[in-house]
């Protein structure tokens, strides 16, 4: 085989060029001839079969020799393919829409799963709250079973339904009256409301000012009643200074024979030197007046009242002097006409001791005026230092005085006089601190409830030479405290007929241990009503338990109706100046000591961590403090609470 190929190659190499040309020419001639012949035979066969030689489908039919489809079906196939394309597109769109729906459902289910997780956490938090609430409810239930004090409210009235029965009047051998022997407590039940009845003031010979003023002021008092059958006490107004037939008292329709539970009002207005009423004329009735002798005054039963020198009622603060400056122009002032010194058996201070201050070399100024013109002279009893000048002149001097000297009655048988009380009234009104010389033998208005040491200086007569040294020792702070307390006492208990009547009624009510009328709930007029809706913001749900879910617990109301005047009566009369109303609760209510919630007084308390304290978790579990069931209104968020609060 290898030899044959070598021979062929050798032959081709040795062949001549002429022979090659002849062979190529022969090929170029023979190939077209054979092609023409073949094509002619094909056309003849087509003509014999009736075909169209010029049909363009001939070429296409030549394709049919190689495929199973015919060329005439191409349009149908194209239409079919277009239909299939549209169907596929539609199916793809449907699949895409289905995919989008499935994706939306997946997203919705994912969101729902997240919501369910959040709901689970919220429900878990609510469950924790409910568990704490159940625990607190169990504690409250056990406390309710242990509670031994009733829930109080404003006292409901239990009043008398009959008139006072007849009791024979006291004899000259009867002991002096007191609340235990001359007062009928059966008409004044603890929850009676202390009803007060006033006899017709027009039936008694008093001035028109007193008749009208007393009728109006008593009518404004919350204890006033028009039904004499239910009254606890009865008020009788008699004239001041006029001769009075005391037999008329025994003929009063509700006198009851001995005048028990009656108060005889003998007010001093124009006459500052009235004759005191004797208990022999009033039987077992209390006497309220401004002048008493030591023999006639029944301690703890009769009532010393200031004279009526102010308006019937209303605001009186505009008449007061300024509290500042603490030290005024005069250190001490006194104006009065020296009484007749020839009377025997009288005790008086030496006026030369006062006049000596004016000649001493001191920077303090004194005003001592003992000379008065007869025209400006106020008529007084022979045993009294008489008032000088007009009221406006005296007020002008007192407004420039740091202290005002007030002499006690020269007659030692008198424990109080209307004239001395008039000086006290003017001094308190004008901001001059009263210095009562001989006050150790005087009784002051409402002294059993109003502490006089907080607004005046009681100076025995023997201390008169040391008075300057004593007055100079007071600091500005103490002066302002005394002046402010005097202002409070004057405004609340001295200033007007309304305040004197209300204080007299409140004093008797305090004596027998009855609470005042509860204050009425009224709409405050401090801020006008506004109809604009308040913009509110939604409160975000806490993510964790913030404490026991207890219902809102209002402040305890009227829990100290009968104990308030025992434990804080001093503050009500001397600090707050409001013994006339009973309030639901006060910011001054006493607080139990810290250990009480663990030893015997645990009812209502929620100590933090059962007394051990703690951080956030313990605070969430229980709200505690020094108040039972304390609910916070202000929360201070701090870290290391004790250290932060100490700083």
Image: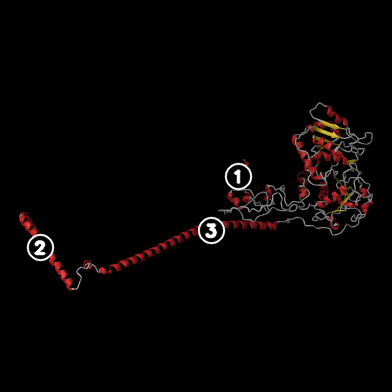
Compare marks 3 and 1 and give the one earlier in the sequence: 3
Q: Report if residue 7 is visible in the image.
A: no
In which quarter of the view is residue 225 placed?
Answer: bottom right
Vertical position of residue 638 compared to residue 200: above or below: above
Give the position of the C terminus as an image quadrant: top right
Q: Where is residue 111 in the image (x, y as percent from the top left)?
A: 49, 58
Secondary structure beneath label 1: helix
Q: Which residue lies furthest to the front in this view?
A: 54
Q: Position of residue 298 (x, y in %)?
A: 88, 46
Residue at left offset 58%, top offset 51%: 617
Of tags 2 and 3, which is closer to the observer?
A: 2
Compare marks 2 and 3 and give the one earlier in the sequence: 2
Q: Position of residue 635 (x, y in %)?
A: 62, 48
Q: Report if residue 501 is visible in the image.
A: yes
Q: Which mark is residue 119?
A: 3
Q: In this view of the protein, which residue sits in the foreground, 278 or 440?
A: 278
Q: In this view of the protein, which residue sits in the foreground, 588 or 214?
A: 214
Compare marks 1 and 2 and give the one earlier in the sequence: 2
- Would you call the spot at circle 3 few (<14 residues within 10 Å), some (14-19), or many (20 or more)? few
Secondary structure beneath label 3: helix
Give how far apart the Cα atoms at labels 1 and 2 are.
120 Å
Pointer 2: what residue? 30
Residue at left offset 83%, top offset 28%: 358
Q: Which residue lies furthest to the top in this view?
A: 361
């Amino acid at each position: 085989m290898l030899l044959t190929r070598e021979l062929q190659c050798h032959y081709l190499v040795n062949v001549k060029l002429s022979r090659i040309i002849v062979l190529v020419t022969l090929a170029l001639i023979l190939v077209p001839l054979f092609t023409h012949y073949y094509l002619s035979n094909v056309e003849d066969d087509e003509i014999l079969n009736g075909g169209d030689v010029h049909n363009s489908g001939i070429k296409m039919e030549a394709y049919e020799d190689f495929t199973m489809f015919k060329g005439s079906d191409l349009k149908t196939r194209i239409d079919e393919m277009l239909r299939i394309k549209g169907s596929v597109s539609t199916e793809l769109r449907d699949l895409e829409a289905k995919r989008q729906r499935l994706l939306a459902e997946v997203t919705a289910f994912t969101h729902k799963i997240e919501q369910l997780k959040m709901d689970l956490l919220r429900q878990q938090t609510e469950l924790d709250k409910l568990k704490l609430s159940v625990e607190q409810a169990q504690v409250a239930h056990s406390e309710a079973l242990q509670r031994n004090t009733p829930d109080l409210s404003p006292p409901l009235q239990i009043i008398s339904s009959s008139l006072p029965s007849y009791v024979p009047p006291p004899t000259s051998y009867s002991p002096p009256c007191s609340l235990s022997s001359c007062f009928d407590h059966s008409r004044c039940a603890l929850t009676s409301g202390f009803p007060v009845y006033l006899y017709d003031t027009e039936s008694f010979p008093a001035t028109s000012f007193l008749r009208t003023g007393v009728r109006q002021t008593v009518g404004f008092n919350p204890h006033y009643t028009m039904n004499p059958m239910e009254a606890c006490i009865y008020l009788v107004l008699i004239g001041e200074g006029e001769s009075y037939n005391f037999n008329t008292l025994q003929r009063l329709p509700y006198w009851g024979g001995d005048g028990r539970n009656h108060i005889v009002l003998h007010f001093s207005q124009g006459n500052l030197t009235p004759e005191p009423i004797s208990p022999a004329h009033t039987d077992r009735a209390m006497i309220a007046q401004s002048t008493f002798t030591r023999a006639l005054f029944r301690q703890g039963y009769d009532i010393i009242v200031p004279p009526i020198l102010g308006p019937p009622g209303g605001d009186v603060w505009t008449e007061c002097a300024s509290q500042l400056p603490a030290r005024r122009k005069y250190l001490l002032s006194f104006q009065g006409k020296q009484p007749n010194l020839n009377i025997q058996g009288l005790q008086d201070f030496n006026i030369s001791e006062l006049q000596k201050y004016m000649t001493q070399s001191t920077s303090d100024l004194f005003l001592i005026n003992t000379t008065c013109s007869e025209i400006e002279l106020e008529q007084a009893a022979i045993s009294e230092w008489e008032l000088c000048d007009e009221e406006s002149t005296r007020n002008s001097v007192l407004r420039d005085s740091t202290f005002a000297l007030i002499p006690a009655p020269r007659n030692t048988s008198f424990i109080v006089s209307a004239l001395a009380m008039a000086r006290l009234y003017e001094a308190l009104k004008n901001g001059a601190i009263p210095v009562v010389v001989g006050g150790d033998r005087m009784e002051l208005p409402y002294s059993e409830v109003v502490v006089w040491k907080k607004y005046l200086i009681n100076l025995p007569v023997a201390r008169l030479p040391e008075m300057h040294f004593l007055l100079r020792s007071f600091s500005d702070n103490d002066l302002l405290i005394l002046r402010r307390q005097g202002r409070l006492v004057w405004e609340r208990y001295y200033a007007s007929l309304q305040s004197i009547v209300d204080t007299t009624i409140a004093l008797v009510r305090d004596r027998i241990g009855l609470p005042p009328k509860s204050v009425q709930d009224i709409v405050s007029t401090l801020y006008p009503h506004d109809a604009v809706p308040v913009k509110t913001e939604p409160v975000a749900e806490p993510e964790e338990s913030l404490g026991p879910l207890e219902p809102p617990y209002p402040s305890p109301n009227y829990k100290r109706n009968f104990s308030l005047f025992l434990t804080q009566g001093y503050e009500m009369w001397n600090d707050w100046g409001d013994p006339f109303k009973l309030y639901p609760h006060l910011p001054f209510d006493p607080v139990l000591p810290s250990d009480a919630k663990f030893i015997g007084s645990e009812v209502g308390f929620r100590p933090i961590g059962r007394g051990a304290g703690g951080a956030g978790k313990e605070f969430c579990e229980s709200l505690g403090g020094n108040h039972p069931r304390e609910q916070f209104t202000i929360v201070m968020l701090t870290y290391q609470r004790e250290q932060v609060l100490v700083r």
